Image (tube, rainbow, N blue to C red):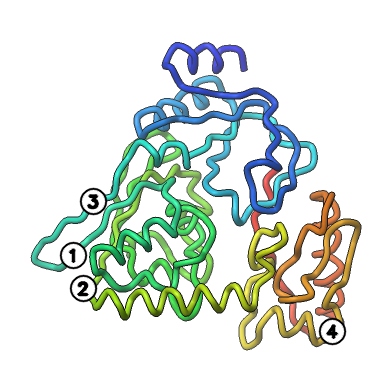
Amino acid sequence: MEQLKQQLQAAGILYKENEPLSAHCTFRIGGPADLFVMPRDEDQLCQTVQFCKQSEIRYYLLGNGSNILFADEGFRGAVIDVSAEAAGMGLSIYQNADGDYISAPAGLKLSELCKFALQHGYTGLEFAYGIPGTVGGAVYMNAGAYGGEMKDVLEAVSYLTADGRWVDSEASELDFSYRHSAFEENDACILGAVFHLEKGDPDTIKARMNELMQKRIDKQPLDKPSAGSTFKRPAGAFAAALIDQCGLRGYRHGGAAVSDKHCGFVVNLGGATCADVLALCDEVRAIVKEKTGYDLEKEIRVVR
């Protein structure tokens, strides 16, 4: 770890030691990271990953922390904040014979990408407005809502491979499916993404974005810490409906609870631990399996 810290200092890359991860995720749960690294641009991000590999220090790439449950004991290694990297990079638009494209850095908040598309009159990303998270995180898990998914508008992704090579791949090569991409298996570091969008009427685009945001406000427990939708949608059913059907609305374990407002969300009522959330999820899964036959799968990522 000392070698890594020396390399970061020499490269002018900011970091903190023993940083509480509860401050960097929407669940507000998680112990300290040995190092919390804040690269300010793409070059520093690539350097940080390279330094970690050289020192054989495990690392985790963190965006907005909106689909993450950090362990109570924290993370032994380096957590790399890619949202800081986005501040040093801009969005860009380009056109070719096949259409119009927007290029975005991985650490950019998805909501900012949606607003940028609106400002320039591009439609296709309305479904993503209000999804908490970054471009990289959304690509990683093929985030979606209200009938749309990232793969529907994604053209290409730039990333570092596990052995440090820079690669640009077309979206069709990255095994996208429901809440899944090749990045869940290939240990790559997403750097940026390109989206293929169509021109549209700004007033219509804005109205649709506002409509979907209002649906989120009306139906989701946005007033309490959570990691968003806790379980994946099982084939032929909806996780929230199954949980509600089993009488689990408001069901608690310690400081964690099934939301009273939307049964698809597990929320932190105050002081919840990772252990509380995992125990609650296990109990909910067992009861739903016993009463309905459906086996729920967690959508949130547990990082230890």
* Quarter of the image with the N terminus in it: top right
Amino acid type, label 2? Lys
Q: Is residue 94 left or right of residue 14?
A: left
First-in-chain label (3 vs 2): 3
**For the residues bearing labels 4 and 1, Cβ distance under 8 angstroms:** no
Tag 1 residue: 100
Labels 1 and 2: the sequence-earlier one: 1
- Asked whether 297 or 71 is in front, the reply is 71
User: What residue would you read off at disc 4?
Assistant: 246
Q: Of the residues under marks 4 and 3, which one precedes in the sequence?
A: 3
Residue drawn at 42 percent across, 37 percent down = 85
Q: Residues within 10 Å of mark 3 (few under 14, many from 20)?
A: few
Q: Nearer the viewer, mark 2 or mark 4?
A: 2
Labels 4 and 1: the sequence-earlier one: 1
In this rendering, would 17 be left or right of 89? right
Question: Camera-side residue: 74 or 134?
Answer: 134
Q: Position of residue 274 (x, y in %)?
A: 79, 50
Whether the residues at callouts 1 and 2 have beta carbons within 8 Å, the answer is yes
The residue drawn where x is 60% and y is 55% is 66
Q: CA distance from mark 3 to mark 1?
A: 11 Å
Q: Which residue is mark 2?
A: 199
Element class at badge 3: strand
Q: Please give the label number shown on residue 294.
A: none
**In x, y percent, where is residue 62?**
55, 43
| Mark sitting on residue 92 | 3
Q: What is the spatial separation of the Cα atoms under label 2 and label 4, in whole angstroms?
A: 45 Å
